[in-house]
Image: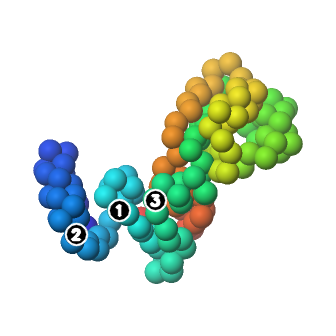
Amino acid sequence: EPTTGLDPQARRVVWRTLRELRRRGRTLVLTTHYLDEAERLCDRLVLLDQGRIVLAGRPQQLILDHAGELVLEVDLSDAPGHAAGDPLLANVLAALDSSELEHVYEGGTLTVYGAGQASGSLEQQFERIPSPDGASRVTRRGTLEDVFLRTTGHALIEGADA
């Protein structure tokens, strides 16, 4: 884990050095918990969960296949009607269930993944998803963190030490 504990400036110096080694044809094997780092530095990667290989491949392809180029996050925690069983939330989830978009609702945040969808049609589909007053809504690009959470589960494992 070459950048653990480093400040942002030192981290970038290490990244530059690793890229230079790679440019010279060196093979590098890195371990990291920083998935943004893996996405930036790796040509290929292996995602492990509890010592088992979950996925392997090129970072961008894993993102497209398992999270999507775009991800929609709707934070409903400050919006009225976000509690489980509330009709407003039920309507939003029903609209999603009738689409081909995969989604997770957890802790007041609805995350909608666009895996396997073209980004142009995704933006249109995301626009059709209703969001109540008071909800914040962000469309962002998919990440390796999304891939990891989708393939290993969103919730922390009960009783596991962090």
x then y, percent, for residue 110 = 65, 40
Is disc 1 in contact with disc 2, using a CB cutoff of under 8 Å? no
Q: Residue at x 31, y 58 (%)?
A: 41
Residue 148 point in image, percent of width and height: 52, 61
Q: Is residue 99 left or right of residue 29?
A: right
| Residue under the image location 56 percent in, 44 percent down | 69
Q: Which numbered disc, 2 or 3, marks the residue closer to the eye?
A: 2
In this view of the protein, which residue sits in the foreground, 112 or 41?
Answer: 41
Q: In the picture, residue 35 is in which quadrant? A: bottom left
Cβ atoms at labels 1 and 3 below 8 Å apart? yes
Q: Say if 150 sits above or below 79 in the image.
A: below
Q: For residue 152, what is the image quadrant?
A: bottom right
- What secondary structure is found at the residue carrying circle 2? loop
For residue 42, above or below residue 49: above
Rendered-image quadrant of the C terminus: bottom left
Tell me, for residue 59, which label it has, or none. Answer: 3
Category of crowding for the residue at label 3, using alpha-carbon neighbours closer than 10 angstroms: few (below 14), some (14–19), many (at least 20):
many
Three-letter residue code for mark 2: Gly
Residue wearing tag 1: 42
Residue 123 versus residue 32 in the image, above or below: above
Residue at point 31% right, 70% down?
31
Give the residue number, with chain letter if any, for mark 2. Answer: 25
| Camera sees residue 69 | yes
Q: Amino acid at mark 1?
A: Cys
Q: Are marks 2 and 3 in contact (CB under 8 Å)?
A: no
Left or right of 68: which side holds 132? right
